[in-house]
Amino acid sequence: MNIGMVLDYVRDWPPGIRAEKESIALSKEGHKIFALTPRYNKELPYKEYIEKVKTTVVRVDVSSTKGTYLANAIRAITLYDKRFKEHLRSYIKENAIDALHVHDIWLIKVALEVADEFGIPVVADLHENMPAAMIASRAEYPFVKRLIASFFWNYQLMRWQEKFMLKRCAHTLIVVEEADFRLKEYGLDERKYSVVSNTEDETTFKFNPSEADSSILAEYKNNFVISYVGGMGIHRGLDTVIKALPYIKDRIENLKLVIVGADSKSQDQILEMVKMLNIKDYVDVISWQPFHKVNSYVMASDVCLVPHNDFEHTQTTIPHKLFQYMICGKPVLVSDCKPLKRIVEKANSGKIFKANDSKHLASVIEEMYHNKESLIEYGKNGQRMALNEFSWKHDAKRLVDVYKLIETEHDRKQNK
């Protein structure tokens, strides 16, 4: 089949880890993969084959969403992105697309409309529980801004629209089993959705721990390092971690929290909190780093964090970095959000604390500090499970099986 990935990332694609892994997995089964994506960098060609991701990337010029408040408001309320409509038509015609694989909620409705014209199926790839994610993202807004956001990104309206969109899709992909509750509430047939998680393995996470930056390892060799890597949104729980430090800063020798990946706005917010809590000497805030540098900080760590706060959103998702930590052989410390708790308990790869509870988090960090032999065992357990039961090869097979079913149905219709 000619499978058309449809993406609207905030930057040029690739990179985009989930879509990259899916494209490679499907291409290995003989499918031809095309990716429709905005052309943000005007120096990039409109069409090129990228060997690394086994994909022909088709870039299109779409108007920016920045600053167009009315257009964004309409897009938010309707979940319909008209910027892509004509591009989708041309894309399907010119590349003989047999199925559309649409990433996230915003492009599903317009993709369904155009796909119906050509009689081709749509697969919805839900990276996140987006109605719930919108609630989480606005949790720290001032009251008036939060009120306005709740009108345009209304939880109930988004769910109502999502329900009818997904019922029209040939198949829906979710990232954890805990995310299926709303699909059941929507009345989706269990045969029409599958879990394709954000797992990794030795083929997708190509980082050799022995290649870690020696200067970074040397910098932290005398510290007990707990590290946080990734986004800085309120739902991710970094606030809980920072507030835990005053409880243990005098109880753990050479304690250091290393935060990697902060944008300038997040850096300012973190440093303001650090200053207020008088813990400047215990926190390093590192800006965005290339892949090998990020993982060098992971290798310099004694414990790696996924401290998600308790939202419906975080109870229904899982980050790639959990499995990356485990592949690196590092013990993890996660909040008790259901997917995190399930995986870490089954892998016996670390410890779990009560989400949003800084005092409990502090006590668990202290416990891990005083039981360093157990950290080695957690690391070994996690690595073993991340390369076996919790491995991308299993999720890739489920993805491939979805397209086998779609292809069978496609051939049946063609032969009628």
Image (tube, helix red, strand yellow):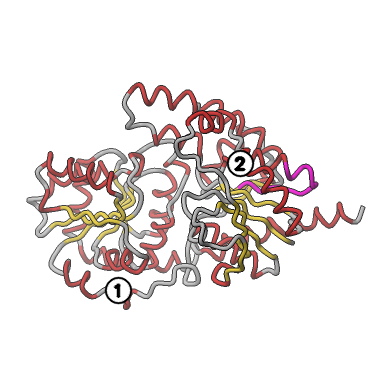
**Label 1 residue SS:** loop
Residue ID at (63%, 44%): 84
Query: From what the image shows, is residue 202 above or below residue 305?
Result: below
Query: From what the image shows, is residue 413 above or below residue 82?
Result: below
**Label 2 residue SS:** helix
Residue in the foreground of this view, choosing between 68 and 16: 68
Give whichever of discs 1 and 2 has the lower sequence position: 2
Residue ID at (65%, 67%): 27
Give the image location of residue 131, x and y in percent. 50, 34
- Indicate left or right for 233 with 396 as reference: left
Residue in the foreground of this view, choosing between 177 and 296: 296
Q: Which residue is mark 1?
A: 212
Q: Amino acid at mark 2?
A: Arg
Q: Residue furthest bottom?
A: 210
Query: From what the image shows, is residue 413 above or below residue 289?
Result: above
Q: Determine which of the numbered discs, if any, sits on residue 83 in the image.
A: 2
- Indicate left or right for 379 with 186 as reference: left
